[in-house]
Each structure stands twice: as C-alpha cells, then as structure tokens.
Amino acid sequence: MSLHTDEHYMRRALTLAEYGAGSVNPNPLVGAVLVKHGRVIGEGWHEKCGGLHAERNALKNRTESACGSTIYVTLEPCCHYGRTPPCTEAILQHKIARAVVGCMDPNEQVAGKGAEILRAHGVTVDTGVLEHECQRQNEVFLHYITTKRPFVVLKYAMTLDGKIAAHTGDSRWVSGPESRAHTHQTRNRLSAIMVGIGTVLADNPTLSCRMEIQHHPLRVGRDPIRVVCDSHLRIPLDAALVRTARAIPLIVAHTCGSREKADALRAAGATVWQCAAHGGRVDLRDLMARLGSEQIDSVLLEGGGALHWAALEAGIVQKVQAYIAPKLVGGAGAKSPVGGAGFAKMADALALHGTTLTQLGDDLLWEGYL
Ligand code: AOF
Ligand code: ZN
C-alpha cells in the first residue's frame, strides 16, 4: 500500500472523527475506516463519551467480513477495559490484517501497548500516518489525559489597531459573520467557556453556542458549561448567565463572596465554588485543577483583558485564537485584548509557536501555541 493511499484513508478517518466534536469530551475524537481489496467496507467514529469506540463502530457498519482488511484509525487502538471493552480484541476477533495508526494514545493504560498487542498477534501495525494532523485534532485530549488539567484557549477579536471595543465600550461587532460562526464551532468543541465578572457586568452575555455546526451530520451545536471568575460574587441574580443556569450549567468561582449571595446563586441553579486566592483574585491554577477533576477537558477563555493577563501570568493558557478585523476604531482609552501590568520589556513578551493564519471573510484568524 503506498503512502499516498494510506494518507487518503487517514484523511477520511480524520473527517469522520470530527463528527464527534462536542459529544466525546473528555474522550478523544477518533475516526476509523476499514478497507479491503482497495474498497471501503466500513466507516465509523467515536460518537459520544461512553459510546462505542471508532473501531467498533466501523466494524458494526461493515458491509462484508473484515477478515484480511486494513483498519485506518486516527488514534492508537485501546487495549484496556474502560467504559467499553478493548478495541484490540475486536481487531483480533475480526482477523484484521493491518492497522494504520495516526497518532499514539498517551493514556497510560494504552501508551504503545495497543500497538504492541496487535503486533504480538501478527497484525501489521504502521504508525505515524498524518501524525501531526491527528495530534492537532486531538490537542484537547492529548493535553488533558496527560495533565488532568483543561486545555485552555484564549480567544479574542480585535480591530487592526488592536482594540476589542470602542472607547465607549461598544463592541458589536468587531469581527465579521464568518469569524463569529467559527467562534461558535469552537464553543461546540470545548467543554467550558470562561469569562471575568467585568465582561458579565459590561455585556451581560449568555455564552451559548447558537450557530449551526458545519461538517456535522446533525448540524446542531451544544452549549459549553459557563464559568465566571467573580472574586466578590458581584454577578447580578438577573444576569443572563444566572437566568439560564437551570438549562445550561453555570459555575461561579469566587474567593470572598458573601454566604447569602452564594446561597441565592445556588437557589437560582448555579454551582458556586470558593477557590483559593492569588493576589486577591481567584487562583486560576486552583480553578483549573478543580475543573479538571470534574472531567472538564477544555476551556475557552473569552475575556476580559484582566482575566487574560492573569491567565497568561498563571501559565494556564495553551493556545491563542486572535481574530483580527480590518477596521480602525482608535481611542486612547479603548481596551485591548490583554490588560494587567504587562511585561516591562519586549524581550519578555510571550512568543507563540506553531502559528497558522486563516482568512475568514475579511478577517484573519491567527492561531498559535504557548
Ligand atoms: C480508541 N478508539 O474511539 C476511543 C479511544 O471509557 P472508554 O472505554 O471510552 O475509554 C476511554 C479511553 O479510550 C480514552 O481515554 C482513550 O485512551 C481511549 N479512547 N480509543 O481506540 C476510540 N475513543
Ligand atoms: Zn478503543
């Protein structure tokens, strides 16, 4: 089988894996394609956490015996009993001859053992096909399974002159419709969305996922859990976030709010966490540890500037998504995406690596990793 053919089927497996976006967390996105005599005889993906793995779904959907076939799978097949039995057993039972793997699974229960077991039973295993793409698709899972902390994406939209709002605070809209649709795809993909109390008081957002999800068979997004950093519990009981707390989970993280306010928020359906303090504010490392222990594998950080700086300073951010709109709004007092004290020297600035640029309508999306 040529490398070209392997990459072709792995690309198909990547497309299938993407259909699980929004439903699999904290599990990985995984796609699988079964190929026999140059024909696809089965396809599947991991549809939801707790459901069948991609390999078993591809086998379930097969149109003929998988004996002697090749399975293309974006992640190393598992070999452990989790919520579901090992995929390696299914591969062996069905006498699959070859497994082509995108990237390895660092879950310590798997971590190379899946491939090893298959090889020990005579299955040809080739690894690392479109490895980089497969790792990027599962950046959330790969981070969470190894650190038990959520993968944090810092997201903002700014004008070409670096403002996230006019000097009056008006910010509807900085970016264009294509960028905003893209943001909703990300809200669907990540488990939680986090803002500071300043953003809640200024914009009264709902932080839901309102857009149709492209590349998804059902085309509906799901809402991320909302998290607000609110040291003094200043969030109004009639804030949109609180009013929708029974329908979409809301976590309010504070350090020194009153017990009465905490009780009132709980009565409205919110979850209230008292967190450790760091410089008088919610200790973000403590908060990330708690979110991680609640199976929240990812957080989209959507403002404001003070929280962004605190998050960068605490070292909890993995990825930056900056939407840049070709507009100039000016204003010495107009806010920029990252506030706080800032670094004194340009040489100290945080540099992103692995950057990509995507054009979305007239806007540019600049993504990179810290
Ligand atoms: C695969 N294919 O489609 C998935 C894998 O609780 P479980 O049974 O769903 O197991 C979850 C673990 O299994 C997860 O942490 C990851 O290591 C692996 N997920 N593996 O071969 C799949 N979803
Ligand atoms: Zn599995």
Image (cartoon, grey):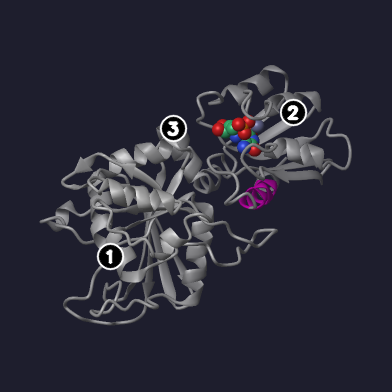
**Where 305 sits versus 42, above or below?**
below
Secondary structure of the magenta portion, mostly? helix
Which residues lie in the magenta part?
Answer: 9-18
Tell me the element at label 2.
Answer: helix
First in residue order: circle 3 vs circle 2: 2
For the question of whether residue 291 can be seen, the reply is: yes
Tell me the element at label 3.
Answer: helix
Residue 322 locus on image (x, y percent): 37, 64
The residue that mark 1 highlights is 337
For the question of whether residue 77 can be seen, the reply is: no
Image quadrant assignment for residue 86: top right
Residue found at x 36% / y 79%: 326
Residue found at x 68% / y 37%: 53
Residue 303 is one of the magenta-drawn residues: no
Which amino acid, by three-letter code, is at mark 2? Ile
**Can you say which quadrant of the picture contains the N terminus?**
top right
Which amino acid, by three-letter code, is at mark 1? Pro
The residue that mark 2 highlights is 91
Calculate the distance from the C-alpha at mark 1 to the C-alpha at mark 3: 30 Å
Tell me the element at label 1.
Answer: loop
Q: Residues within 10 Å of mark 1 (few under 14, many from 20)?
A: many
Residue found at x 55% / y 25%: 112
Image quadrant assignment for residue 193: bottom left
Left or right relative to 49: residue 320: left
The residue that mark 3 highlights is 146
**Where 23 sits versus 108, above or below?**
below
